[in-house]
């Protein structure tokens, strides 16, 4: 399996924190050198490991905001 390259270009906020230090964060992330998108997922304290998450375009994030 190929390595996934990522760069957190903007930290937006933390939604929650687990007992082992992992945090559910909202960030703007560039995946494999592509344009950064809004990303919601769990991260370990040093941002080297991640859980499953969801990535949204700016338009999808705006629509989610409207729906909420």
Image (cartoon, rainbow, N blue to C red):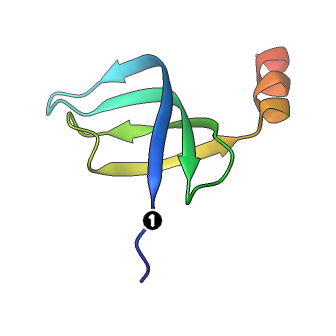
Q: Position of residue 50 (x, y in %)?
A: 35, 49
Q: Quadrant of residue 20?
A: top left
Q: Residue furthest bottom?
A: 1
Question: Does 48 sit left or right of 16 as displayed?
Answer: left
Q: Nearer the viewer, residue 23 or 36?
A: 36
Classify the position of the C terminus by image quarter.
Answer: top right
Residue at 85%, 16% (x, y): give it. 66
Tell me if residue 5 comes above or below residue 66 in the rendering.
below
Can you identify the residue that label 1 sits on?
4
Position in image of residue 49 (x %, y %): 28, 51
Foreground residue among 47 and 23: 47
Image vertical order of residue 22 relative to residue 64, above or below = below
In percent of the image, x 82 and y 22: which residue is there? 62
Q: Is residue 25 left or right of residue 34?
A: left
Per the image, label 1 sits on a secondary structure element best described as loop
Q: Is residue 55 left or right of residue 52?
A: right
Return the residue found at the far front: 33
């Amino acid at each position: 399996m190929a390595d996934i390259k990522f760069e957190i270009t903007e930290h937006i906020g933390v939604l929650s924190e687990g007992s082992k230090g992992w945090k559910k964060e909202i960030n703007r992330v560039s995946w494999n050198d592509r344009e950064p998108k809004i990303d919601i997922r769990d991260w370990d304290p040093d941002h080297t490991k991640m859980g499953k998450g969801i990535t949204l375009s700016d338009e999808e994030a705006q629509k989610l905001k409207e729906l909420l």
